[in-house]
Image (spheres, grey):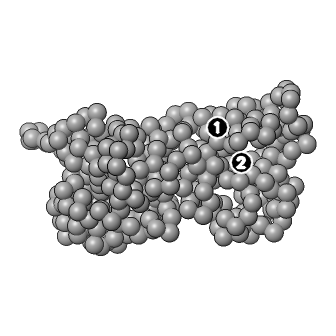
Amino acid sequence: MEYAAKNLVSGGPNLNNLSVVVLRDGLDPPEDCLEMLTTQARLQVVSEGDLGDVIDSADVLFVWPFRVPTLRSNWQRAKRLKWIHTATAGVDGLMFAELQESDIVVTNSRGVFELAIAEYTLGLLLMFRKDLLTTVRLQQKRQWRHRETGRLAGARLVVIGAGPIGREIGLLARCLGVEVEVVARRRRENDPDFGVVRAVDELHGLLGRADFVVVATPLTRETRGLIGVDEIEAMKPGAYLINVGRGAVVDEVALLSGLESGRIAGAALDVFEKEPLRDDHPFWNRSDVVVSPHMSADAAGWQKAVTSVFAENLRRYSSGEELLNRVDKRSGYGGGFQADLQE
């Protein structure tokens, strides 16, 4: 589907001659988002199966799907491509060696999802601490069973990931009196938000004291399998693991073993090694696991917000200004922030 440009901003090059391809994901992006972009450029909106038909003429690619395997398979035809923007914060589903080694600029949608993910995570902390899962189960059984629950104030939380998402989670949790430790690749003193940011090699010592462990890091070579058998064993008995980062950061076999043995009390997983989670996976049937379909970031209005980020970058691109949210393609970290197990 093609959308002609209208009301082009004056002062820059004629973007009507610029080929902007929007790679959609299902029904995304909505029509009002596309209308927002046609004030600046001519658009071609295609599904992934049709990417090969337009990639040879594309100057700019706006990617909505999380994973884009057809981009690599059509890479040799992407002769004109200069810039890719992704509607996500993490970029691991997009990256491959040829793209990393190229001169093509990659930008992400950092700034859209942080607070939504932090609120979602805070809801999970409250759910576990207040034992709301049991409350719902007892209601379904019509059982009146009075019991005590815990408080978040004074609980200890370790957030793995010191980027914008991890920071927002830590700051929001602190508002309820939670003691927060944030972990990054390198230790940093005098952090403006947390005083000290711990190094990843300090993680084991922190796990044994944490009531909650939240994974909020992107998937990179360094973070793949970061939470494995040793880390699950190091966790405090009765603790909870929450993953809102990437599924492959957590060894799911090790996590399942830790749950079955009672080593940890439960887990909330919004991301998985393979998505969607297969319907016979044991996580579905466990009363101590909350499964959600990679939705923690998707608060109402996120599509328009993502489109606004791309629209601003398109304006900058047309006027030769520096693009927002440039990604370090080799490390996999989102642009504009220190590359320390972020987002």
Q: Which of marks 1 and 2 is in front?
A: 1
Q: Distance between the residues labelled 1 and 2?
A: 11 Å
Q: Quadrant of the N terminus?
A: top right
Residue beneath label 2, please?
A: 62
For the point 46% across and 67% down, the residue is 222
* Mark 2: secondary structure: strand
Query: How many neighbours does mark 2 have within 10 angstroms: few (below 14), some (14-19), or many (20 or more)?
Result: many
Residue 49: image location, x then y, percent: 74, 60
Residue beneath the point at 86% across and 29% down? 11
Judge by depth and name the residue closer to the eye, 77 or 223: 223
Q: Tell whether 12 sits left or right of 139.
A: right
Near mark 1 (Cα within 10 A), the count class, few <14, some 14-19 or many ≥20, is many
340 vs 187, left or right, is right
Can residue 169 be seen here? Answer: no
| Of pointers 1 and 2, the one earlier in the residue sequence | 2
Task: Please tell me whether residue 266 is drawn above or below residue 300 in the rendered image.
Answer: below
Which amino acid type is marked by label 2?
Phe
Horizontal relation, residue 117 to residue 158: left or right: right
**Relative to residue 4, is residue 78 depicted above or below?**
below
User: Residue 47: image x %, image y %?
Assistant: 73, 53
Three-letter amino acid code at the position of disc 1: Val
Instruction: State the count of labels.
Output: 2
On residue 290, the disc is: none
Q: In the rendering, at what x and y percent does residue 3 appear?
A: 83, 38
Report the disc number at residue 309.
Answer: 1
